[in-house]
């Protein structure tokens, strides 16, 4: 039996119902991940880390196929410039590898923004802290677990 993932442990501490799903092989696309999980691509939440300055980061949660409206993000953050974090920065700030990042079980507090669209599906999935494994939970439980997340419209094509 595999041990629980870092995100599963964090959610369990908050009494948030969820389940883990392990992919049998490498995941090469959003569509493949959704199909294997029995979901639609918009049910997959991507956790994307941005660097605002040398040591200031923000995580943005987006529904799978949605693209971030960079102008809206810069305006919301009142930043003229921001960049996506490098692989090394993602590891250092979140403790996770790209493809396994989630807003839970982080080593230190981090500002988290969520596009409103992530709460549209009844069930969603997100990184578990371990590549090839995901966390599946209801969007209502995700909202409860996120607490004071900043809800913003950041997608180019919010549906």
Image (spheres, rainbow, N blue to C red):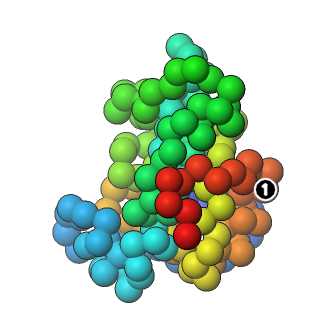
Quarter of the image where the C terminus is located: bottom right
Q: Which residue is drawn at 37% across and 43% down?
A: 97
Q: Residue at x 59, y 50 (%)?
A: 154
Decide if residue 56 is on the left or right side of residue 88. right
| Coordinates of residue 114 in the picture (x, y in percent) | 64, 53
Q: Which residue is drawn at 44% across and 43% down?
A: 96
Residue 4 visible in the shown view: no
| Coordinates of residue 144 in the picture (x, y in percent) | 76, 66
Decide if residue 75 is on the left or right side of residue 6. right
Residue 41 visible in the shown view: yes
Binning the other alpha carbons within 10 Å of mark 1 as few (below 14), some (14 to 19) or many (20 upward) gives few
Q: Nearer the viewer, residue 154 or 136?
A: 154
Q: Which of 68 and 34 is in front in this view?
A: 68
Is 96 located above or below residue 10 in the figure?
A: above
Residue furthest to the right in view is: 148
Decide if residue 2 is on the left or right side of residue 152. left
Q: Nearer the viewer, residue 111 or 7?
A: 111
Q: Quadrant of residue 145?
A: bottom right
Quarter of the image where the N terminus is located: bottom left
- From the image, tell me which residue sits under label 1: 147
Q: What element carries label 1?
A: loop
Q: Residue at x 68, y 36 (%)?
A: 76
Residue furthest to the bottom in view is: 38
| Coordinates of residue 59 in the picture (x, y in percent) | 57, 41
| Coordinates of residue 46 in the picture (x, y in percent) | 46, 56
Residue furthest to the top in view is: 54
């Amino acid at each position: 039996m595999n041990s629980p993932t870092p995100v599963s442990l964090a959610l369990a501490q908050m009494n948030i119902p969820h389940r883990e799903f392990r992919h049998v092989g490498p995941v090469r696309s959003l569509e493949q991940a959704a199909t294997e999980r029995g979901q639609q691509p918009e049910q997959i939440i991507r956790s994307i880390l941005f660097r605002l300055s040398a040591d200031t980061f923000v995580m943005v949660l987006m529904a799978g196929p949605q693209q971030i409206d960079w102008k809206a993000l810069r305006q919301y953050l009142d930043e003229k410039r921001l960049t996506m974090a490098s692989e090394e920065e993602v590891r250092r700030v979140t403790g996770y590898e790209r493809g396994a990042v989630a807003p839970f079980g982080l080593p230190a507090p981090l500002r988290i923004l969520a596009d409103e669209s992530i709460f549209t599906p009844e069930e969603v999935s997100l990184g578990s802290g371990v590549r090839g494994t995901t966390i599946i939970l209801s969007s209502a439980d995700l909202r409860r677990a996120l607490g004071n997340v900043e809800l913003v419209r950041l997608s180019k094509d919010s549906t």
